[in-house]
Amino acid sequence: MALINENYLRLSENYFYTEMDKRINAFCVTHPKANVIQLGTGDVSQPLPPAVVSAMTDALNELSQKDTFRGYGPGQGYKFLREKIVKDYQTHGVSLSTEEVFVSDGAKTDAANIGHIFGRDNIIAITDPVYPVYENATIMSGRAGYHNENGKWSNIVYLNCLAENGFKPVIPSEKIDVIYLCYPNNPTGTVLTRQELKVWVDYALENHSLIIYDGAYEAYITEKDVPHSIYEIKGAKKVAVEIRSFSKTAGFTGLRCSYTIVPKDLIAFTSEGEKVQLNRLWMRRQTTCFNGNSYIVQRGAEAVFSKEGRKQVNETVQYYLTNAGIIRDELRNLGFEVYGGVNSPYVWAKTKNGEESWSFFQRMLCEINVVSTPGVGFGPNGEGYTRFSGFNSRENTMEAVERMKNWR
Ligand SMILES: *Cc1c(COP(=O)(O)O)cnc(C)c1O
């Protein structure tokens, strides 16, 4: 008899995005002439940088010729790409070796799969609100404990991110072993300064905890005192894994390429208290369960670090940031309390008069045909908030903002 991993049955239905789509579709069916503008999405809209396309075309040509054909690549990623990543870190004063860089096909993939190398009994901490992958992966792995009536899991520590603390988590009183942090944050668009991130690194050093730092939006950082990498903080190599992606940076959401840094200094413990290098475990995991991303995609990713590539990527990031700024300014004009949109493509807005997330969603959809993502989809603390993104085109962003001006 084949048995299933019953933890999958304990996941809540993928209710949230299904519900959003259902409501949008229902509206479009009854209002076929309406031009609905999506400002909720976490997906990019602008095409790939020309430098990336050109590098991938060359790579495809290489694979088309007998003399330059390549089959399987290294499971850790091609060295040409890992070298460029190492150089990129150097620009922020972080020195890594290529052996500490693991190329992958998605930050989401790695944020979920990294759990393979950790013991069952870790207490995991996530923020509330949060990018949902960290919690779902924890549940699937059987580490979440049991589900309380309040919708929370017994072995997960929820770090409250509230308006009164600028949506920044504070060190909890419970002991925590593995902490997921994502900055610049999705969904709130907020950041941690160097000093604020240092508090977490110091906590991890003192308590032998591990931080999984999701830096998917690193390219959106505009302010000086915001660290681009957790490794800018002293001691972080001993306690942190950092995950980055080309998705939101260079339009790779459909193409797929990311990387994870697992420093050689990073250790965790056996139940006997013996130290083990995580780099070694992750190497073993990746070479066993993953055969590397495609050569073509990795050549495309390499081109992101070329002179033209950087310029093109930067222009697109600025384009999204300008959109986010347009949304933020207009919401503020309209009297909304807003966060983010400065070091992030996301603007996090509080609804007025305590209106619930879904009610706001429905009203904005029906009355001005604009969509944002209900904050409650990211956790209970997201109730009463909504997430706008700057990822749509400028034209659509302007049109949506115009509609909001005349909206009551
Ligand atoms: C979009 C996003 C990712 C996903 O990145 P992929 O590389 O496309 O899998 C990871 N983390 C956060 C916080 C994101 O918003």
Image: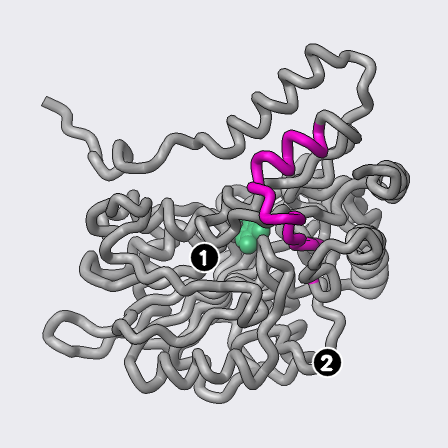
268 in the magenta segment? no
Among the 4 quarters of the image, the one containing residue 114: bottom left
Residue that carries the numbered disc 2 in the rendered image: 224
Residue 51, image x, y percentages: 81, 52
112 sits left or right of 80 in the view: left
Q: How many marks?
A: 2
342 sits left or right of 72 in the view: right
* Residue 237 visible to an observer of this rendering: yes
Between tags 1 and 2, which lies in front?
Answer: 1
Quadrant (top left/top right/bottom left/bottom right) for the C terminus? top right
Residue 265, image x, y percentages: 38, 81
Q: Residue at x 68, y 54 (%)?
A: 346
Badge 2: few (under 14), some or many (20 or more) residues near its Cα, within 10 Å? few
The residue sitting at the bottom extreme is: 234
| C-alpha separation, residue under disc 1 versus residue under disc 2 | 26 Å
Q: Residue at x 10, y 75 (%)?
A: 272
Q: Residue at x 35, y 84 (%)?
A: 205
- Closer to the camera in the image, 405 or 91: 405
Instruction: Tell me the amino acid under the disc marked 1.
Output: Asp
Label number found at residue 128: 1
Q: Secondary structure at mark 2?
A: loop
354 in the magenta segment? yes
Q: Residue at x 52, y 47 (%)?
A: 383
- Is disc 1's CB within 8 Å of ligand 1? no
Tell whether label 2 touches label 1 (CB within 8 Å): no
Dot 1 or dot 2: first in sequence order is: 1
Residue stretch in magenta: 344-365
Badge 1: few (under 14), some or many (20 or more) residues near its Cα, within 10 Å? many
Instruction: Tell me the amino acid under the disc marked 2.
Output: Lys
